[in-house]
Image (spheres, rainbow, N blue to C red):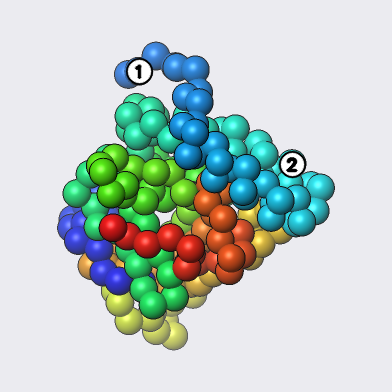
Amino acid sequence: MTTRTRSAAHWFFLVGAALSFTASCSPADPAAPSVDDAASATDVAPAASRLGADVSKSLASLRSATAAFHDVNAAIAAGYASPSGIPCVESPEGTMGVHVVKASLLDQAVRPNEPELLLYLPKANGGFKLVGVEYLVPVLVRNLTTGAVSPWFEMTPWGASYAVVTPRPSVFGEAFEGPMPGHEPGMPWHYDKHVWLWNTNPSGMFSQWNPSIACP
């Protein structure tokens, strides 16, 4: 993944605050997707149905839970960061888009209907299109000498004096990728899983990169 420009201090704060918590807006009705967004969801439905009845049902539930976030303001009101100013991530393998995180979800739990990140694609004429979600679980390691448990922020892997505490998570029957280093300074080692819920991905619903979309 290409490097994003979110500051190291930003990630230190988000992960530290969320994991420390673990160891005001009135609710609004879910916003209906726009015509373009609804068309994308219709295109995705056949691919989801091929994953099996249980997974299809779970994805339908996730789609319902995130439908309001086609409206960026609804996502911000729900606690996700604003996508404005965050670079669109792409590579020769495809595109991920703009990642916006909800800091309060950065812990060791996987909540199928509450993804840690939303994936947006900037629109050429302004605004953002919701294309998918990403689940992210920070990797915790234990210092075998002191017993201290913490995230690992260095780009190089931990040595033999540390042991991984966090088991590989899964969601919808799919194991997360990782553990992998942070994609920018200050982002911890983590496991993640992408779900292309709102835009067809020819590489697969759960692939990291989507070659069918491109950053403007």
Secondary structure at badge 2 equals helix
Horizontal relation, residue 133 to residue 111: left or right: left
The tally of labels here is 2
Residue 128 percent coordinates (x, y): 33, 43
Q: What label sits on residue 57 in the rendered view? A: 2
Whichever of labels 2 and 1 marks the residue nearer the N terminus, that label is 1
Q: Residues within 10 Å of mark 2 (few under 14, many from 20)?
A: some
- The single residue placed furthest to the right in the displayed view is 53
Residue 204 percent coordinates (x, y): 61, 64
Q: Image point 25% across, 42% down: which residue?
A: 126
Mark 2–mark 1 Cα distance, whole angstroms, equals 29 Å
Foreground of the two, 147 or 178: 178
Q: Is there CB contact under 8 Å for labels 2 and 1? A: no
In the rendered view, tell whether residue 92 sits above or below residue 167: below
Q: Toward which corner of the image does residue 185 lie, by quadrant? A: bottom left
Amino acid residing under circle 2: Lys
The residue carrying mark 1 is 25
Residue 92 percent coordinates (x, y): 39, 77
In the rendered view, tell whether residue 133 sits above or below residue 62: below
Amino acid residing under circle 1: Cys
Q: Toward which corner of the image does residue 214 lie, by quadrant? A: bottom left
Foreground of the two, 151 or 40: 40
